[in-house]
Amino acid sequence: MASRSITILGATGSIGLSTLDVVRRHPGRFSVYALTAGTRSEELAALCREFRPKVAVMADAQAAEKLTELLWELPDISVLSGEPGLCDVASAPEACTVMAAIVGAAGLAPTLAAVRAGKRVLLANKEALVMSGKLFMDAVSASGAELLPIDSEHNAIFQCLPPDKIRDPDAAGITRVLLTASGGPFREHTSEALRSVTPAQACAHPNWSMGQKISVDSATLMNKGLELIEACWLFNVTPDRIEVHVHPESIIHSMVEYADGSVLAQLGSPDMRTPIANGLAWPERIDAGVAPLDLFRIGRFHFERPDLERFPCLRLAAEAFEVGGTAPAVLNAANEVAVAEFLKGNLAFTDIPVVIQRTLAATPVVPADSFDIIFAKNSEARQRAQEQIALLTV
Ligand code: NAD
Ligand code: MG
């Protein structure tokens, strides 16, 4: 069997490292064509020494220069930089699979490059799809790219759908999608207690070990809002057919309800290597190194409705999707800026939704007719979000 050659965008992150862990377990099956990272040259150099990619890319020229120095003993590895370098390795003919695991809007251009080149695209970077929605899905259809969801909920839904009707819910007889959510670390906090939570508390997720940005998104429930939008696009369902179920054990990763009353669920330990291995090997199944599920130990499952009063980000995301056009791109940009400022200690946790709401109000919505419009709105919304933060913090 010829090995499947992979580009990993965001190799030094939580998803990138989990992907490499699965790759490491199957040396004959996968080979690494390219690895990319933002600023951490030393970490990428160590991964290059182990996985020997043909190309390594850093987000900027300075970090790339440092990587070149660190890799002096491996001159066969080409080092590239910036968005052109990222798009290059995402679309290169040498790679058939691209793991899209850069965090945030920075991942849109390279993920899109992989889509346009018709790759198997393993989509972790949900922000790319949230920002550009229909344009992104149209690009998938036009190129024939194979888009496989890596987000655990969407990978679960994907596994519970008939493979030939992934984007045809009526033909599949689907009545509802039950999107599960852990509820995050502050599920039982009062509104008052939420005001003073710290970045360290927000990043200490009870069930999942993830990057900082998605950890904060899980704590505000914006992650579930982004995932609601992601599910609408991936599976061609309307939001009224998606119901969020807070399930604090994080064992059921999501469910699909059918017209005959059947509800199919995908279960597993909360470990991203399961959906990653599913995407890498699909339609085959391979060892992911994940501990077997011990239901006797877990004992009970619980479900509750999300509280949109304490966690308004979920409602803001649903509203932005209903408004359509560039609203989801603005929502995403404002959230990224607000979360970054919260992580730096410059913004209260409870002001994250305030900044998003005010940025949405201050940024006119236009039809999302082109990727250029999406990129422009993303920049505009970032600036508006910074203005709103400055007003809040004076
Ligand atoms: P992370 O912060 O751990 O890693 C992000 C990666 O992107 C790193 O390799 C970083 O170097 C790179 N990067 C950051 N900014 C960049 C830039 N401007 N240009 C180029 N590269 C840049 O994040 P993560 O938790 O691995 O999440 C990655 C994506 O996967 C996110 O979109 C997240 O929503 C999604 N996701 C993550 C998980 C999880 O369990 N971690 C689960 C579902 C979905
Ligand atoms: Mg998820």
Image (spheres, rainbow, N blue to C red):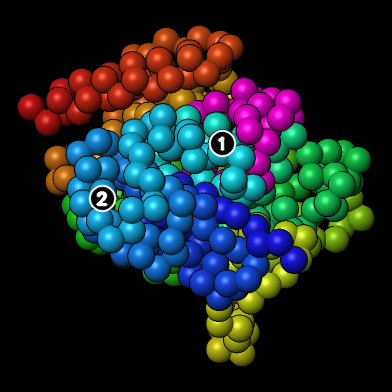
Q: How many numbered circles are shown?
A: 2
Q: Which residues are magenta?
A: 116-143
Q: Which mark is residue 91?
A: 1
Residue 280 x %, y %: 64, 59
Which comes sooner in the sequence, label 2 or label 1?
2
Where, by quadrant of the figure, is residue 339 drawn? top left
Give the Cα distance between marks 2 and 1.
22 Å
Dot 2 amino acid type: Leu
Asked if 121 appears above or below 255 in the picture, the reply is above
Where, by quadrant of the figure, is residue 288 drawn? bottom right
Ligand 1 has an atom within 8 Å of the beta carbon of the residue at disc 1 = no
Can I make out residue 75 in this image?
Answer: yes
* Magenta stretch prevailing secondary structure: helix
Secondary structure beneath label 1: helix
Q: Mark 2 = which residue? A: 67
Asked if 172 appears above or below 74 in the picture, the reply is above
Asked if 179 appears above or below 290 in the picture, the reply is above
Q: Which mark is residue 321?
A: none
The residue lying at 79 percent from left, 45 percent from top is 166
CA neighbours of label 2 inside 10 A, class few (<14), some (14 to 19), many (20+): many
CA neighbours of label 1 inside 10 A, class few (<14), some (14 to 19), many (20+): many
Dot 1 amino acid type: Ser
Residue 24 left/right relative to 379: right
The residue lying at 47 percent from left, 30 percent from top is 109
Based on the picture, tell me whether residue 103 belongs to the magenta stretch. no
